Image (cartoon, rainbow, N blue to C red):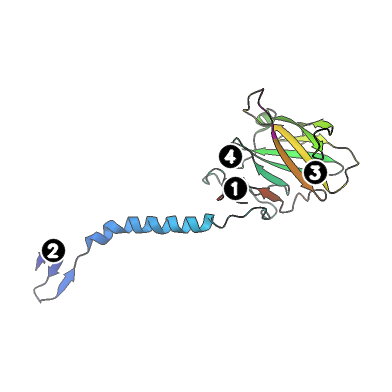
Amino acid sequence: MRSIRGVLVLASGLTLSATPFLAKKMPAIQKELVSSSFSSFTAQGQTDVPGPAPGSTPAAAGQGAHMDHKPKHGGTFFMALDNKHHLEGILVPPGTFRVYIYDDHAKPLKAEETRQASGTVQVGESDDAPKIDLAPGRKKETLEANLGNGVKFPVTLTLLLHLPGMEQDAKPELFNFRFAQFTDERGPGTCHPMANMPNMHC
């Protein structure tokens, strides 16, 4: 038996082709297939798609940042412009607007971090509408504003939020929430990915 350029010649005259180049090519082929599959998956991102089923949990620890934009409490889910935070707003009887703040992995902030946020809520979109201060919520990881018992639907709430980590004199970020009824906290909710991030989806 002897070898000629990767071909084994047996005594019987039969030949076996040795193909070591395939072993070198396989990792590249596998990488290309994985990349192709991932691109196909992320290209399917949509906006305003219903969120998860009741009882859903935040993104898994191993999942990348900004990969989970599903509402956790049936509300409206936003990504903040600082690329570090997400938030969700809900409206519950008799007229309480509640805000949940999350980190970039959609994990709820600890109570002490949430307390570093501050803001106001206005009913409607007029700059002249009265501002209602957010205060620590009944749930320690939330902020709330009491809108009173006279909420009429549909209603738009304008939130001006100063997020944790922002400079004291920084301009608060504006978020608009539209409610046709009180929030079903076990419902799917909606999300609003940023327009300049096409691969971000609910």
The residue nearer to you, when weighing 21 against 8, is 21
Q: Are marks 4 and 2 in contact (CB under 8 Å)?
A: no
Q: What is the quadrant of residue 140 in the picture?
A: top right
Asked if residue 156 lies left or right of residue 20, the reply is: right
Vertical placement of 86 versus 26: above or below?
above
Whichever of callouts 4 and 1 sits on the residue coming sooner in the sequence is 1
Mark 2 crowdedness (10 Å alpha carbons): few <14, some 14-19, many ≥20? few
What kind of element bears circle 3? strand
What is the C-alpha distance between the residues marked 2 and 3? 75 Å
Q: Are marks 1 and 2 in contact (CB under 8 Å)?
A: no
Indicate the quadrant containing the N terminus: top left, top right, bottom left or bottom right.
bottom left
> In this figure, which residue is indicated by the disc labeled 1?
68
Farthest-out residue, front: 127
Which disc is residue 156 wearing? 3
Whichever of callouts 1 and 3 sits on the residue coming sooner in the sequence is 1
Whichever of callouts 2 and 3 sits on the residue coming sooner in the sequence is 2
Q: Give the residue at x 15% y 67%.
A: 7
Which mark is in front, 1 or 3?
Answer: 3
> In this figure, which residue is indicated by the disc labeled 2?
5
- Amino acid type of the residue that numbered disc 1 sits on in the rendered structure: Asp
Whichever of callouts 4 and 2 sits on the residue coming sooner in the sequence is 2
Which disc is residue 104 wearing? 4
What kind of element bears circle 2? loop
Q: What is the quadrant of residue 119 in the picture?
A: top right
Task: Label the magenta part by its dominant secondary structure.
Answer: loop
Vertical placement of 63 versus 148: above or below?
below
Q: Give the residue at x 53% y 54%.
A: 42
The residue range painted magenta reads 169-173
Whichever of callouts 4 and 3 sits on the residue coming sooner in the sequence is 4
- Amino acid type of the residue that numbered disc 2 sits on in the rendered structure: Arg
Q: Give the residue at x 74% y 42%.
A: 176
- Amino acid type of the residue that numbered disc 3 sits on in the rendered structure: Thr
